[in-house]
């Protein structure tokens, strides 16, 4: 039986294993863990709790292609810290969706757009925390369209 002491090859291999292990952990921490944790945005309190809410109604008759008005108001100019919490209320008697023209992701709130349909009497809400600009529509009734622009508060 060989004895393990400070001068034996076994000791050296053990030490190298520990060093490699620590180095690998450090590399993992700096390359994957740290950037991931830094990515989570810290959002200003005023943006998380804006002064007021923005309401959009999907009005009665929106499912009728001949009806002009559906998302009311149709155009939104939203200011961060003021009215960036937006609520779409379905006051119609048909289910609708709020679906962006192109994929839009807010780094705090995630992907914009309703999960499936919004039933009559229900609503969909989204907290915008950064600048954004998009058109949106309703999947079952593509003539239902709206636009929104989110900008920083103008002092
Ligand atoms: Cu619809």
Image (tube, rainbow, N blue to C red):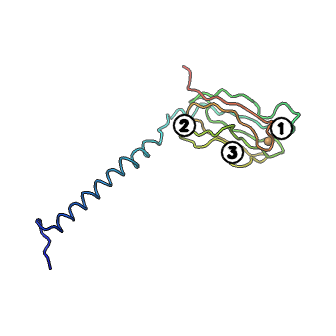
Residue 109: x %, y % from top left: 57, 42
Q: Identify the image quadrant of residue 133.
A: top right
User: Which sits earlier in the primary sequence, circle 1 or circle 3?
Assistant: 1
Marking on residue 48: 2
- The residue furthest bottom is 1
Q: Which quadrant holds the N terminus?
A: bottom left
Badge 1 crowding class, 10 Å Cα cut-off, few under 14, some 14 to 19, many 20 or more, is many
Residue 15: x %, y % from top left: 20, 61
3 sits left or right of 103 in the view? left
CA distance separating discs 2 and 3: 20 Å
90 sits left or right of 34 in the view? right
Residue in the image at 32% along x and 55% along y = 24
CA distance separating discs 1 and 3: 17 Å
CA distance separating discs 1 and 2: 31 Å
- The residue furthest top is 155
Q: Is mark 1 within 8 Å of ligand 1?
A: yes
Disc 1 secondary structure class:
loop
Q: Residue under circle 1?
A: 62
Between 4 and 90, the one lying in front of the other is 4
User: Which sits earlier in the primary sequence, circle 1 or circle 2?
Assistant: 2
Residue in the image at 25% along x and 62% along y = 17
Q: Ligand 1 is in which quadrant of the figure? A: top right
Marking on residue 114: 3
Q: Which quadrant holds the C terminus?
A: top right
User: Which sits earlier in the primary sequence, circle 2 or circle 3?
Assistant: 2
Q: Is residue 71 above or below residue 153?
A: below
Residue in the image at 65% along x and 34% along y = 53
- The residue furthest front is 9
> Which is closer to the viewer, label 1 or label 2?
1
Residue 45: x %, y % from top left: 50, 35
Q: Identify the image quadrant of residue 9.
A: bottom left
Q: Are marks 1 and 3 in contact (CB under 8 Å)?
A: no
């Amino acid at each position: 039986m060989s004895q393990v002491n400070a001068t034996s090859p076994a000791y050296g291999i053990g030490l190298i294993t520990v060093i490699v292990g620590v180095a690998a952990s450090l590399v993992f921490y700096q390359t994957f863990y740290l950037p991931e944790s830094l990515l989570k945005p810290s959002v200003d309190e005023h943006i998380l709790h804006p002064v007021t809410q923005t309401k959009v109604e999907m009005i009665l008759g929106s499912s009728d292609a001949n009806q002009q008005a559906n998302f009311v108001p149709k155009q939104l100019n939203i200011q961060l810290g003021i009215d960036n919490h937006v609520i779409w209320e379905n006051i119609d008697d048909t289910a609708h969706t709020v679906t962006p023209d192109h994929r839009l992701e807010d780094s705090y709130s995630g992907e914009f757009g309703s999960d499936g349909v919004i039933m009559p009497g229900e609503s969909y809400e989204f907290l915008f925390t950064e600048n954004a600009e998009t058109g949106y529509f309703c999947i079952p009734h593509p003539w239902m369209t709206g636009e929104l622009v989110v900008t920083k508060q103008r002092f």
